Image (cartoon, helix red, strand yellow):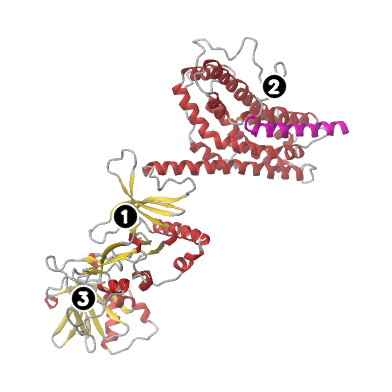
């Protein structure tokens, strides 16, 4: 008994030595456990006539190289709980008529049979494919020996482990099943060495690419592979299929051992050891999955860089792609949104334009926004639903997703990247996490002027200069944007230049207010400030502090040339007056109506969305977009016409 224990300890010690030697660069040539004349069960030895010799024409089978897709590796992670791996084995392990073998023993028999077949495949890979290719490389010099070693990675270590240790231990335990009905202790002892598979899996795709490349490049290389693939021992399968066997093996161990644990009786002596062995097999599978995940990440990253044109300042293997997809860019000048594409990495957001002629790169990078200084939030815009704002130091973008779910997904992905950066750099914590209302985020805070790109107010949202309140026209007073605050201003109000840090300190067009703040210079006024008129109440500010606001159709001749639609607001601090603006961002209303004393009546019965204000010859007709909106307006105007001040419990319900 003592001698047997020492022999087992010696075998494990030899395994450790062999495993470490196989991982050491420049180690001695590979040592193989199957010498001539000595073969384990399931390993078919070479026949005297040489089964690897070139077959006749009748026996030859078309077995050209086929590259294994990376998606196959990804699918392995999803198959760990499936039973697909066992379909090919169940037919052989079903007991014959009249036999009543325990379920757990039949599973161990199945494990042994599949292990025998697996060692035979490893023998084919290491002793035949590898050795024949290595011999050809040394004799013909048609392809490098290093290429052969890279293709087969650490196959020799895996083959030695299974042929010399795992398979003999399983065979011995099944032979002694009557006296020792257990395998949990055997698998516990050998399972840690299964982590060597992660190296094989990590190298698998590179090996497949090298195999495909040299099969096309070197006829002698292809000739050796074709000769072996066409043999009876290869089963008319390609080398790529045989190379997949190690990738599939650990998931099969896990499934078989899981079923073994389930079939064991509650009082079985092997139950605790088998459960612990299953946990160790699962750990080995996780190592392989981690290798697959890392390989997938690098492959996806490389594909993204190729689509972006491999720009030097973007290519970084440490980056992680978090999300990509198409979006619509809301333009501040054009009518319709424009097609754009976003790539969100852990440290940057790339705003790209699809190339019309996709030769090489598919996208052109327009803007790179650093995640470290980025803010995101949802926009409430009736004209552009599912829109959101991305504000960064380099640029601020108004974007539109194709659905509410897609918008939420983008916001969550961006915020997750921001939170991760925040953990690494606490100096940005206040900028990332500070809760700001819509009014505060609509305009940059004064201390941020010039430090980050502003959100530009869209042209059609204003009809007059947001600084001097003079109306725009196409000839003498055109629209311009202040590069510091984003306001739409006229040429006279934006005839100043200041250096902006977010734009590499280049002088840019700014309005007078921003120029004064950024430079500290006070310019003399050409004329005295006009006294603020009753109509000079900003529509944007009023919208945030209003009892009621929305667009209404303005019907009838009473409105003159003011247009067919107006932005109507009843302010909380001035609840008895209706202000009508041409656009939501205008700084001055074109009409104000004192509501006190007016009668609110329904319009013509033909359209229930119409209502009117009437008082001693004055008649104003409005049309809401919906009946529900019309009812809210009627309620708000009736309160104002009766002289009721705000403060009631339902006042908040009137706001749009």
* Mark 1 Cα shell of 10 Å, populated few (<14), some (14-19), many (≥20): some
* Closer to the eye: label 3 or 1: 3
Q: Quadrant of the N terminus?
A: top right
Separation of marks 3 and 1 at Cα, in angstroms: 33 Å
* Closer to the eye: label 1 or 2: 2
Q: Quadrant of the C terminus?
A: bottom left
Separation of marks 1 and 2 at Cα, in angstroms: 64 Å
* Lower position in the chain sequence, tag 1 or tag 2: 2
* Lower position in the chain sequence, tag 3 or tag 1: 1
* Label annotation for residue 468: 3
* Lower position in the chain sequence, tag 2 or tag 3: 2
Return the residue at label 2.
34
* Label annotation for residue 328: 1
Q: Closer to the camera, 487 or 25?
A: 25
Residue 581 lies left or right of residue 435; in this view the side is: left
Q: Residue at x 34, y 38 (%)?
A: 360
Residue interval drawn in magenta: 1-26
Tag count in the figure? 3
In this picture, is 450 found above or below 28? below
């Amino acid at each position: 008994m003592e001698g047997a224990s020492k022999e087992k300890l010696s075998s494990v010690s030899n395994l450790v030595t062999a495993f470490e030697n196989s991982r050491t660069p420049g180690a001695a040539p590979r040592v193989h456990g199957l010498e001539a004349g000595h073969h384990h069960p399931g390993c078919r030895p070479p026949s005297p006539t040489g089964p690897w010799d070139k077959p006749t024409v009748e026996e030859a089978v078309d077995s050209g190289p086929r590259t294994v897709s990376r998606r196959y590796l990804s699918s392995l992670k999803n198959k760990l709980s499936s039973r697909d791996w066992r379909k090919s084995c169940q037919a052989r392990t079903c007991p014959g008529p009249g036999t009543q073998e325990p379920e757990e023993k039949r599973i161990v028999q199945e494990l042994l049979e599949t292990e025998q077949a697996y060692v035979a495949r490893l023998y084919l890979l290491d002793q035949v494919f590898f050795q024949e290719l290595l011999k050809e490389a040394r004799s013909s010099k048609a392809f490098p020996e290093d290429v052969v070693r890279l293709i087969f990675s650490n196959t020799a270590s895996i083959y030695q482990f299974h042929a010399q240790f795992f398979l003999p231990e399983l065979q011995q335990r099944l032979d002694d099943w009557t006296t020792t009905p257990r395998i949990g202790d055997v698998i516990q002892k050998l399972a840690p060495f299964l982590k060597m598979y992660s190296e094989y899996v990590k190298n698998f795709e590179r090996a497949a690419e090298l195999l495909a490349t040299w099969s096309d490049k070197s006829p002698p290389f292809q000739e050796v592979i074709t000769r072996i693939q066409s043999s009876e021992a290869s089963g008319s399968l390609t080398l790529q299929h045989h190379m997949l066997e190690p990738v599939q093996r650990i998931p099969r161990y896990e499934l078989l051992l899981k079923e073994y644990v389930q079939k064991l009786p509650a009082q079985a002596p092997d139950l605790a050891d088998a459960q612990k062995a299953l946990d160790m097999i699962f750990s080995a599978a996780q190592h392989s999955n981690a290798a697959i995940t890392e390989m997938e990440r690098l492959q996806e990253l490389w594909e993204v860089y190729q689509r972006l044109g491999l720009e030097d300042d973007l290519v970084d293997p440490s980056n992680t792609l978090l999300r990509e997809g198409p979006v619509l860019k809301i333009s501040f000048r054009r009518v319709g949104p424009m097609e754009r594409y976003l790539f969100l990495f852990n440290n940057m957001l790339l705003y790209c334009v699809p190339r019309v002629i996709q030769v090489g790169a598919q996208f052109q990078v327009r803007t790179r926004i650093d995640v470290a200084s980025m803010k995101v939030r949802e926009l409430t815009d009736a004209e552009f639903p599912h829109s959101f704002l991305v504000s960064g130091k380099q640029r601020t973008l108004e974007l539109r997703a194709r659905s509410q779910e897609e918008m939420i997904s983008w916001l969550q992905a961006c915020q997750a990247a921001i939170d991760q950066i925040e953990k690494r750099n606490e100096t940005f914590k206040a900028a990332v996490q500070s809760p700001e209302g819509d009014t505060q985020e609509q305009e940059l805070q004064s201390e941020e002027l010039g430090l980050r790109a502003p959100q530009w107010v869209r042209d059609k949202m204003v009809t007059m200069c947001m600084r001097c309140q003079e109306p725009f026209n196409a000839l003498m007073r055109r629209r311009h944007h202040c590069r510091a605050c984003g306001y739409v201003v006229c040429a006279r109000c934006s005839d100043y230049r200041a250096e902006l840090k977010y734009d590499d300190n280049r002088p840019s067009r700014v309005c007078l207010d921003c120029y004064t703040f950024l430079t500290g210079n006070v310019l003399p006024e050409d004329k005295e400030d006009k006294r603020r008129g009753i109509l000079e109440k900003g529509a944007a500010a009023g919208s945030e502090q209003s009892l009621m606001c929305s667009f209404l159709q303005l019907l009838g001749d009473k409105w003159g040339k003011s247009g067919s639609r107006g932005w109507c607001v009843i302010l909380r601090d001035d609840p008895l007056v209706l202000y009508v603006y041409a656009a939501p961002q205008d700084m001055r209303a074109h009409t104000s109506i004192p509501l006190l004393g007016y009668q609110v009546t329904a319009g013509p019965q033909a359209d229930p969305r119409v209502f009117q204000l009437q008082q001693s010859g004055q008649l104003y007709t409005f049309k809401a977009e919906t009946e529900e909106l019309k009812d809210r307006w009627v309620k708000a105007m009736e309160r104002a016409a009766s002289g009721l001040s705000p403060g009631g419990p339902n006042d908040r319900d009137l706001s749009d």
